[in-house]
Image (cartoon, helix red, strand yellow):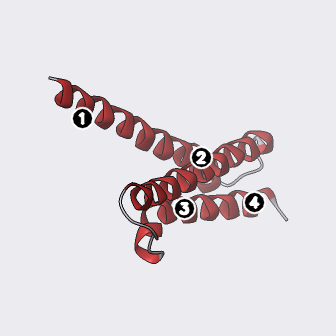
């Protein structure tokens, strides 16, 4: 399998994991009630996000190992996956910081 195909396959895997982190709570209904139900939803979300981050890192490693072997689209896709996931986690951290500040202020 060529390096281009690996990059596109990993990019599709990353997009699937990133999308599933949001869709999981709609597709699979959590069981239990109260705290356990909420933690099941949050745990699934974080798990899918961690898997998406690992796929994005693998995508970046494949891209860096390939050097100039890739098409222009494949070269640009690897950093984009990692940047989107990183910006998403940064946004969550900022939102949590602001929310915590409001609670104590």
The local crowd at label 4, few if under 14, some if 14 to 19, many if 20 or more residues have their Cα within 10 Å, is some
Name the residue that disc number 2 marks: 53
Q: Is residue 28 above or below residue 2?
A: below
The local crowd at label 3, few if under 14, some if 14 to 19, many if 20 or more residues have their Cα within 10 Å, is some
Name the residue that disc number 1 marks: 99
The local crowd at label 1, few if under 14, some if 14 to 19, many if 20 or more residues have their Cα within 10 Å, is few
Give how far apart the Cα atoms at labels 1 and 2 are: 24 Å
Looking at this rendering, what residue extends furthest in the left direction?
A: 105
Q: Are marks 3 and 1 in contact (CB under 8 Å)?
A: no
In the depicted view, which residue is nearer to us: 64 or 13? Answer: 13
Looking at the image, tell me whether mark 1 or mark 2 is earlier in sequence order: 2
Looking at the image, tell me whether mark 3 or mark 4 is earlier in sequence order: 4
Name the residue that disc number 3 marks: 15
52 on left or right of 102: right
Residue under the point 24% across and 30% down: 98
Residue 46: x, y in percent? 51, 50
Name the residue that disc number 4 marks: 6
Looking at this rendering, what residue extends furthest in the right direction?
A: 1
Q: Are marks 1 and 4 in contact (CB under 8 Å)?
A: no
Looking at the image, tell me whether mark 2 or mark 4 is earlier in sequence order: 4
In the depicted view, which residue is nearer to us: 82 or 99? Answer: 99
Could you tell me which secondary element the residue under label 3 belongs to? helix
Q: Quadrant of the N terminus?
A: bottom right
Q: Is residue 101 above or below residue 93?
A: above
Q: Are marks 3 and 4 in contact (CB under 8 Å)?
A: no
Looking at the image, tell me whether mark 2 or mark 3 is earlier in sequence order: 3
């Amino acid at each position: 399998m060529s390096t281009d195909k690996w990059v596109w396959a990993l990019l599709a895997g990353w997009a699937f994991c990133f999308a599933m982190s949001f869709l999981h709570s709609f597709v699979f209904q959590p069981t239990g009630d109260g705290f356990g139900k909420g933690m099941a939803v949050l745990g699934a979300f974080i798990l899918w996000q961690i898997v998406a981050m690992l796929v994005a890192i693998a995508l970046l490693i494949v891209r860096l190992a390939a050097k100039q072997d890739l098409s222009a689209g494949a070269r640009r896709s690897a950093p984009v996956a990692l940047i989107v996931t990183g910006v998403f986690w940064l946004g969550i951290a900022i939102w949590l910081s602001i929310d915590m500040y409001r609670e104590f202020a």
